[in-house]
Image (cartoon, rainbow, N blue to C red):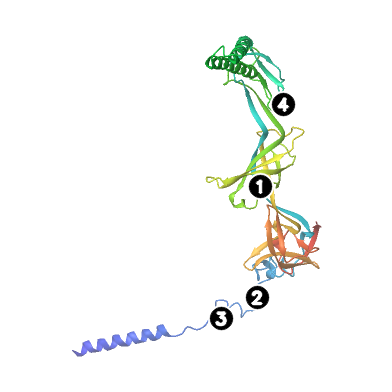
Amino acid sequence: MSKPTGRISVILIALVAVGLLVFLKPKKAEAPGGAPGAKGPTAAGASAVPAAGGPGPGGAPNGGKGPGGPGGPGGPGGPAVPVTARVLQAERLENSISSSGNVLANEEVEIRSEVQGKISRISFKEGSRVRKGELLVKIDDSELQARALQAQSRRKLAEDNEYRMKMQLKIEAVSQKDYDQALNELNLAKAESQLLRAQLDKTELRAPFGGVVGLKQVSDGAFVSSATLITTLQEIDPVKVDFTVPGKYAGLVKAGQAVNFTIQGADTRYQGKVYAVDPRIDPETRTLRLRAMCPNPAGRILPGAFATVEMPFQTVEAALVVPSQAVSADARGTKVFLFKGGKAEPRPVQAGMRTDSTVQITGGLAVGDTVITSGVVQIRPGSAVTLSRVD
């Protein structure tokens, strides 16, 4: 290698070494405030503490006096939070199943004629009560009456003939065959007479049970057959209520259980009892069908009405119940806040049955405890509270 080339290499190596030293040399620390040394704002007397009114601990102005902070509303050192409370008392609690159902008549039938003919008389008044066996409709039976007279004459002749044959048979004036033929003719005449009597009875449509007759669908003189609807008859005292419950409650329901229900369009609450339970769960809906009976002496409950049914299946005579909003839950469990000497004191509890608005407390509270029922989200353990209302 020539000497000029060697000198150039040495110079390049020296320059690289100097650059590395400059790059790796530590920088001189700057004073707080962004200027070197003591020439920054802090050296001129500026304070590093936030000015009065600036954000403090807790993310609130004035040194953390915001909600939830030590000095804010709801905090231990803040102003008292107005709340409502309830003094616990033992009360009766019912756990119930709510369902929808339909009102049915206790008995219901469509009045139709079994024989064809013209209506000769309508004896009922629409919407009125009738007794069992009362005549409702009469079908013209003039033709049947004439046939019945013919049958009666043939029967009388057959009876006389049978009697003569019997007497002659005793003296062996006729054979046994002749007597049997006469007896058979008598039996046929009796059967024909009974058949016509039955047809005549069917021309009188009578109430099969006592109840309220519906609107008539025909008029006097109309020709009717078995396909013609004349009216309806319903027994509406008592009435039945059909409803279903989820199949998982099948082991808790039985005949004799009380039910409460209301009907659409009325606020009156009615009571009844379950008298029949379907022996199978519907495989499509997974529900169990039940039927209850309810007295209806005033006739205010009409068949076909929609019913909202509640069936209690568990009753606690002395239960402690609090509003749902008074109970809160976190990772450590369920708790409520008690009012103790103007402070909010947390108390872990065990919850039992729940409804839309209440929770049963099975452990952690006693009769006489004052439970805070509103403002729960604003208070913390030890928060100062004032009672605006006590239930």
Position of residue 13 in the picture relative to residue 371 (left or right):
left
- Pick the front one: 323 or 157: 157
| Amino acid type of the residue tagged 1 in the rendering | Ser
Name the mark nearer the viewer: 3 or 1.
1
Helix, strand or loop under label 2: loop
Q: Residue furthest bottom?
A: 3
| Amino acid type of the residue tagged 2 in the rendering | Val
The residue singled out by tag 3 in the image is 31
Badge number at residue 180: none
Q: Mark 1 Cα within 10 Å, few/some/many (few <14, many 20+)?
A: some
C-alpha distance separating marks 3 and 2: 16 Å
| Amino acid type of the residue tagged 4 in the rendering | Lys
- Quadrant of residue 12 in the image? bottom left
Q: Are marks 3 and 2 in contact (CB under 8 Å)?
A: no
The residue singled out by tag 1 in the image is 98
The residue singled out by tag 2 in the image is 49
- If you read the primary sequence from the N terminus, does the residue marked by circle 3 or circle 1 appear first? 3
- Quadrant of residue 163 in the image? top right
Relative image position of residue 148 (x, y in whole percent) = 62, 12
- If you read the primary sequence from the N terminus, does the residue marked by circle 1 or circle 4 appear first? 1
Helix, strand or loop under label 1: strand
Q: Mark 2 Cα within 10 Å, few/some/many (few <14, many 20+)?
A: few
Instruction: Identify the residue at horizontal 65%, vertical 52% (top origin).
Output: 252
Helix, strand or loop under label 4: loop
